[in-house]
Amino acid sequence: SSEGFWRFIREKYLADYIVIDSKNYKKPISKPQVLQIANYLKEHGAGLFAVIFTRVGSDNGANLTIREQWMVHRKMIVVLNDEDVEAMLLAKSAGGEATNIIGHAIERFRLSI
């Protein structure tokens, strides 16, 4: 993309490609699932941005690993749950930007550090 949200993601996180993983777990994802997707993120590969879609979010171990991946390796891993996906679909159907949900998730994470 040459403009807007996806341009920002491409430039800020070197995301020529977006790595996406879907987890259909009943429980929150944990550290191993974060490390699994982090292995795909490389500056000279797909880039340093990934989204994990999960039913119920992430546990404390996953959250600490996401923070570590960002602070040490500059890998941005965003976890979105069913509510986020529903909000994205509703935003898009109302003529809004579904990407705002991803942007807000990044903003909350970055401001929490």
Image (spheres, rainbow, N blue to C red):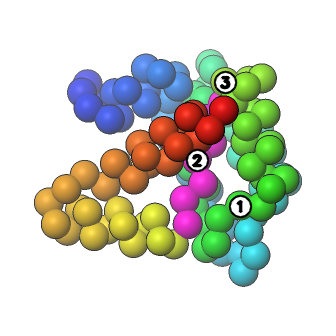
Q: Position of residue 94 (x, y in %)?
A: 16, 66
Would residue 5 be found to the left or right of residue 52 on screen?
left
Q: Are marks 2 and 1 in contact (CB under 8 Å)?
A: no
Q: Earlier in the sequence, mark 1 or mark 3?
A: 1
Q: Quadrant of the N terminus?
A: top left
Image: 41 above or below 79: above
Give me the residue at 60% from left, 29% from top: 48
Q: Position of residue 9 (x, y in %)?
A: 43, 30
Mark 2 belongs to which amino acid?
Answer: Val
Image: 51 above or below 69: below
Q: Which residue is mark 1?
A: 58
- Looking at the image, which residue sits at the far left? 95
Q: Quadrant of residue 8?
A: top left
Whole-angstrom CA distance, mark 3 to mark 2, is 13 Å
Is any part of residue 34 visible from this angle? no
Mark 1 belongs to which amino acid?
Answer: Ser
Would residue 82 be found to the left or right of residue 40 on screen?
left
Whole-angstrom CA distance, mark 1 to mark 3, is 19 Å
Q: Quadrant of residue 21?
A: bottom right
Q: Which residues are magenta?
A: 75-81
Report crowding for label 3: few under 14, some 14 to 19, many 20 or more residues within 10 A (C-alpha): some
Q: Which residue is mark 3?
A: 74
- Looking at the image, which residue sits at the far bottom? 26
Q: Which residue is mark 2?
A: 78
